[in-house]
Structure formats: C-alpha cells, structure tokens
Image (cartoon, helix red, strand yellow):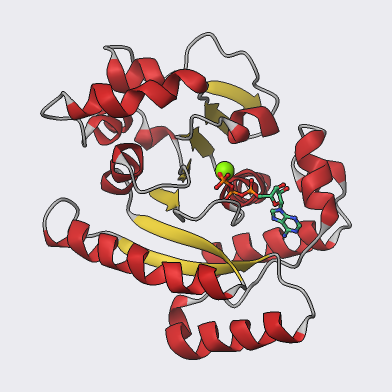
Amino acid sequence: MKVISILNHKGGTGKTTTTVNLGKALAMQNKKVLVIDVDSQSNLSQHVGVEEAQETIYEALCGKKSLPVIDLGDNLHIVPANIDLAGADEELKKNVNGYFKLKTALSNIHENYDFILIDCPPSLDILTINALIASDEVIIPTQSQYFSIRGLQTIFELIEELKQNLNPDLKIRGILLTQVNNTVINKTIQDTVYEGYGDLVFKTFVRQNIALTEASYSNQSIFEYNPKSQGAEDYLNLSKEILHG
Ligand SMILES: Nc1ncnc2c1ncn2[C@@H]1O[C@H](COP(=O)(O)OP(=O)(O)OP(=O)(O)O)[C@@H](O)[C@H]1O
Ligand SMILES: [Mg+2]
C-alpha cells in the first residue's frame, strides 16, 4: 500500500489530470485505487462526475465523520471535495492536531487499497501539509517552463523540512514532465531538468494532448474518452514505470 501526494504549488501543472489518469491506469491493472480531492476547486471530483456530493472530505477533516468514499466502479474510488473546503484552513489551524487530520482519517481505511493518490491544491497550505504528512511518496508534475523549474526548489525545501520532523520517511517518487511539446525552448528546459535532477525525473513524460482536456469535460478518464490517444499511452506508461520501475 502506498499513499502518494500529487503536488505542485504552481497552478495548472497537471496535478488533477495526473491523479485521474494515473489512478485509472493503476485500477485497470487490477490495483485497488482511492483518489482523494484535497482542493476546494474540486476539479478532481468534477472530472470523475461527482458534482454534488452530500458528504465531502471537509466533514472528515473538520468534523468527526469518517472519510466519505464513493465507489466509481472497476477498482476506483474517490473521496470528493467541494467549495466548503475553502474554510478548512482556518478550522484546522485552531486544532492542535490540525496537521495530522488526513493521516488519522486514512488510518482506518488505507489497508483497503493498493494506491491512494492525493490531488493537492496549488498552494503549500495546511491542506497540502496534511497530504504530505499522510503520504509515503510525492509525485511532482511540472511543465517544461522556466518558472515551473524554479519552483521545484521550494518544494524540495518543504519536503526536507517535513522529513526532519513530521514525516521522516517521505520520499520523492519523481518529477513528472507534463504538457511536453516539440518547441526548442521546451526541449532545452527538459534537458535542464534531466541534467539537474537525474534519477528523480520519471523516464515517462506526458506530451501535450488536447484529448486530456476533452476527457475532463466529458467526465471520463483518458482511457474511456480516447484509449488510442497520446495521453492514454503516456499515462499507461507512467503507471507501468511506477509498478515495475
Ligand atoms: N498533457 C496535457 N496536454 C494538454 N493539456 C493538458 C495536459 N495536462 C493537463 N492539461 C490541461 O491543463 C489544464 C490544467 O491541468 P490540471 O487541472 O490537471 O492542472 P492542476 O495542476 O491540477 O491545476 P490546479 O493547480 O488549478 O489544481 C487543464 O485544462 C488540463 O485539461
Ligand atoms: Mg488541480
């Protein structure tokens, strides 16, 4: 069993797209998968078609309820979020155990799954820290753009800080290059990432592919929307790299 945070404080780097499609790819290979929406934008919940959940992660983090798990079928499950989660920050800060709420909530159910993927918000707030404390590993989706690469250092520093104290075993599973295209600047930055971070970068990268966006609008994973697309090929390869190295 592995809990993996999909993390980048920069917006729009492919966190939610990766959570949905990596989750589905692992589920298709007979792994029991839970995806968790820890973002008040609730894009993950919308992507899988859970728009109006009655119970969400908010009640589990800020109240006394257990995590509400919805079975999506075919080995895939979700804990949804909605806009209520925007109020969690303040609630959690008032609580002495506020940073450990997700870890505690997961302890009752994590044995039911092979993989738990947590879709983090685009910030390094208390919800993100909850995700990182509950996690074994971190995947960092990154666009091949100059400012995205500069932001990686901030993430590494946060992870180092957490390792010193709150979660000593936290591991970076990999940097995932997303929205990769054939432009020269994009290629140059890719090379810089592979040179600078070496083995920390997944061999698999995700090419820019409009089908991934279209799939999100049709509330499907890329494997349902267009199994022959480049996006499907790339996320299947990523899942294999994670399962088999
Ligand atoms: N490989 C790709 N090719 C083309 N479009 C992509 C790709 N990956 C993601 N996108 C699109 O880019 C946008 C941002 O992706 P996504 O929502 O996954 O990022 P995010 O990191 O979760 O964003 P946020 O920080 O707001 O949570 C979406 O419209 C998504 O469909
Ligand atoms: Mg997102």
Residue at point 52% right, 25% down? 80
Task: Count every numbered label the image shows and give the total.
Answer: 0
Q: Position of residue 156 (x, y in %)?
A: 32, 68
Establish if 194 lies above or below 99.
below
- Residue 159 in which image quadrant: bottom left
- Residue 204 in which image quadrant: bottom right
Answer whether residue 41 is visible to the viewer in this image: yes
Residue at point 66% right, 44% down? 24
Left or right: residue 9 compared with residue 22:
left
Left or right: residue 70 compared with residue 231:
left
Q: Position of residue 227 (x, y in %)?
A: 85, 51
Residue at point 22% right, 60% down? 169
Q: Position of residue 243 (x, y in %)?
A: 54, 62
Establish if 35 lies above or below 210.
above
Closest to the observer, 173 or 26: 173
Establish if 136 lies above or below 186.
above
Residue at point 20% right, 56% down? 162
Answer whether residue 57 is visible to the viewer in this image: no
Q: Position of residue 229 (x, y in %)?
A: 86, 58
**What is the residue that sits farthest to the front in this orientation?**
147
**What is the residue that sits farthest to the top in this orientation?**
54
Left or right: residue 80 compared with residue 135:
right
